[in-house]
Amino acid sequence: MDSFLISQSPPLKGSVEISGAKNAVLPVMAAAMLSDGISQIGNVPQLKDMRTMADVLRVIGCRIKEDGSNLSIDSSGINHLEAPYELVKTMRASFYVLGPLTAKFGRCRVSLPGGCAWGPRPVDLHLKGLESLGAKITVTHGYVEAEIDGKLKGGNFIFPISSVGATANVLMAATLAEGTSILQNSSIEPEITALANYLADMGAKISGIGTRTLIVEGVKSLNAGKGATIADRIEAGTFLAAAAITRGKVRVTKMIPEHQTALLEAFMSMGCGVECGADYVELDASDRELSPVHITTLPYPGFPTDMQAQLMAVLATIKGTSSVRDTIYNDRFKHIAELERLGAEISLSGDTAIINGGTALTGAPVMASDLRASAALVLAGLVAGGKTEVSRIYHLDRGYENFEGKLARLGGNVERQISGQVQ
Ligand code: EPZ
């Protein structure tokens, strides 16, 4: 298994380009199956999760072609309405095939995704949402079986809590239902808005895009889709955090600043300089004494849970008492023990971590446990004295394209150790 060998680095300087968003491209790849044509997706990031989703679609019978950052998905030959455990267990987003296959073919069998590093990840809202469209759902032997005689029927569903994945699955299913569906308390994450826009381009009739109430008038069929993947707001936030933790000055480009409001407010509260342009944000933390802040994660447009680990690493370097509360996943704190190995002083009480920041970090071997935790450990390694080895970096490869190369171009000393290679 690959690892990163990181040496203490100077303040990062320069500019970095952001790739397409993992969490936007995955549902759009599933949405392609709603049509019988060849859908095109642009600005696709080269990520392990994208390849896993492509493998799932191939098992189902799609033909997929990659041309650089362009993907084409031919769903005219779908012949196997099942997503197997071997693939779904490696990537929860494979579960996105449930809505499209049920809507298009009237039945499918999808493995339950199982848990992840930080605990259970239920799918009950996906299932209840599909049942509100008439699907008959049974769960046996670790698989969800969905079926409907004929087509799904338009229905009304109120998501009891904001769920990105469940909104995506039910929205995709509703596009081919007979009749109108009203989906309330839908997620408004940019990735959901991007999915809705892609579906509309395919001919879906959706109103309220970007709001918590989506009204979908089902249609008989959808055309092939086309569209470019929006920039990855979490990758962008991670590089802004890299600038902050190293007290550097970095311009993050090819991004969407308006997707980052809560995060930028946190950096400004710390005392970072933040300059926004049309498609860039420049964060300046050089020669600044940053101040502690208190973060609470919330559904969009609140502070994103996918940035709490990275911010915790930054807060560990800021003198004073900070806190990070995760209201989305109250057990997403596997990174605390590893950050403590680097000298961070963090205590956890329920869903809130209290960071006693300012102690100089020192390098040590640490282990990544999930995608965003691994990014946090890399950031901490950039400022820890001496060398830090982050193992199990395959977690990071799921969601960051050429992370070490982009950091190196900013002056970060990060080297990938290929497993099994003689050092
Ligand atoms: C998406 O996961 C993202 N993944 C996650 O990013 C992100 O952390 C999460 O949204 C929250 O923003 C992708 O987009 C591929 P949810 P998802 O359904 O859809 C509970 C990353 O690092 N819930 O919005 O699985 C759930 O337990 C990944 O890129 C139910 O109770 O998240 C959580 O507490 C990690 N029942 C809350 O809702 C359900 O049926 C929000 O989860 C579904 C969810």
Image: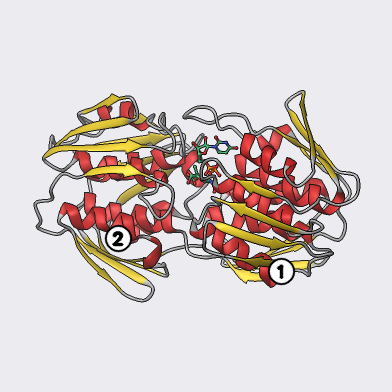
Question: Ligand 1: does it lie within 8 Å of the C-beta at label 2?
Answer: no
Residue at x 67%, y 43% (from the top left corner):
129
Give coordinates of residue 330: x percent, y percent. 40, 31
Q: Residues within 10 Å of mark 2 (few under 14, many from 20)?
A: many
Element at label 2: loop
194 lies above or below 109: below
**Residue situated furthest bottom in the rendering:** 278
207 lies above or below 177: below
Residue 208 visible in rendering: yes
Q: Which residue is mark 1?
A: 225
Element at label 1: loop
Which amino acid does the dot numbered 2 rest on?
Leu
Residue at x 62%, y 29% (from the top left corner):
114
Q: Is residue 129 left or right of residue 342?
A: right
Give coordinates of residue 210: x percent, y percent. 52, 63
The disc, 1 or 2, on the residue closer to the chain's N-terminal end is: 1
**Residue 135 occupies quadrant:** top right
Q: Are marks 1 and 2 in contact (CB under 8 Å)?
A: no
**Residue 76 occupies quadrant:** bottom right
Residue at x 81%, y 67% (from the top left corner):
37
Badge number at residue 410: 2
Q: Nearer the viewer, residue 136 or 112?
A: 136
Which amino acid does the dot numbered 1 rest on?
Gly
Q: How many marks?
A: 2
Question: Ligand 1: does it lie within 8 Å of the C-beta at label 1?
Answer: no
Residue 67 visible in rendering: no
Give coordinates of residue 201: x percent, y percent. 68, 72
Q: Residues within 10 Å of mark 1 (few under 14, many from 20)?
A: many
